[in-house]
Amino acid sequence: MSTIESLHQYKSELYHLSNRVQLLIKRKDDFFDYSVLQDIVMRIVEILESANPEKGTLVAIMKEKVYFSLAQVLERTSEMEQDQNEDILIRFDLLAKTQASIQSLIQVL
């Protein structure tokens, strides 16, 4: 598979993950399974590590920002899994950060 084909495949998967996050945002139920969000974030990290577009320093900086944001989401989701008094605003903040990371990656790829 060529680099362009693989980047297109990654981009397509990112759109799919973006749709999954949108569905999570629309859910209004009390129970929220943070492992689902963690799985999505881990897949984004895998894509981030695998996709290497040759676009220079700006891409490298963007990838670092996305890594940092996703690391924050992962850290907070593991805390939220253990906290029984979930704050819905925190949930939406984590989902929004994940969505923003996906959109940033789509632009870079």
Image: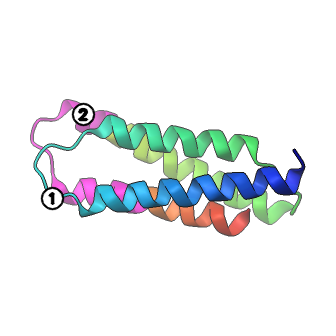
What count of labels does the image hold?
Answer: 2
Q: In whole angstroms, how far apart are the C-alphas of marks 1 and 2?
A: 17 Å
Q: Residues within 10 Å of mark 2 (few under 14, many from 20)?
A: some
Q: Quadrant of the N terminus?
A: top right
**Mark 1 is on which residue type?**
Lys
User: Image quadrant for the C terminus?
Assistant: bottom right
Instruction: Report x, y in % for residue 48.
Output: 67, 47
Q: Amino acid at mark 2?
A: Glu
Which numbered disc, 1 or 2, marks the residue that appears first in the sequence?
Answer: 1
Residue drawn where x is 49% and y is 44% of the image:
41
Horizontal arrangement in the rendering, residue 20 relative to residue 16 (left or right)? left
By secondary structure, the bulk of the magenta-drawn segment is best described as: helix
Q: Is residue 72 visible?
A: yes
Position of residue 46 measured from the top left corner of the image (x, y, whole percent)? 63, 38
Q: Residue 33 lies in magenta, yes or no?
A: no
User: Left or right: 2 with respect to 20?
Assistant: right
Tell whether position 89 is magenta.
yes
Callout 2: SS = helix
The single residue placed furthest to the top in the displayed view is: 82
Residue 4: percent from the left, percent from the top? 85, 57
Q: Residue at left 30%, top 55%?
A: 24
Q: Residues within 10 Å of mark 1 (few under 14, many from 20)?
A: few
The residue shown at (72%, 59%) is 61
Disc 1 element: loop
Give the residues in magenta: 78-97
Q: Which residue is mark 2?
A: 81
> Could you say which is closer to the camera, residue 105 or residue 79?
105
Q: Quadrant of residue 31?
A: top left
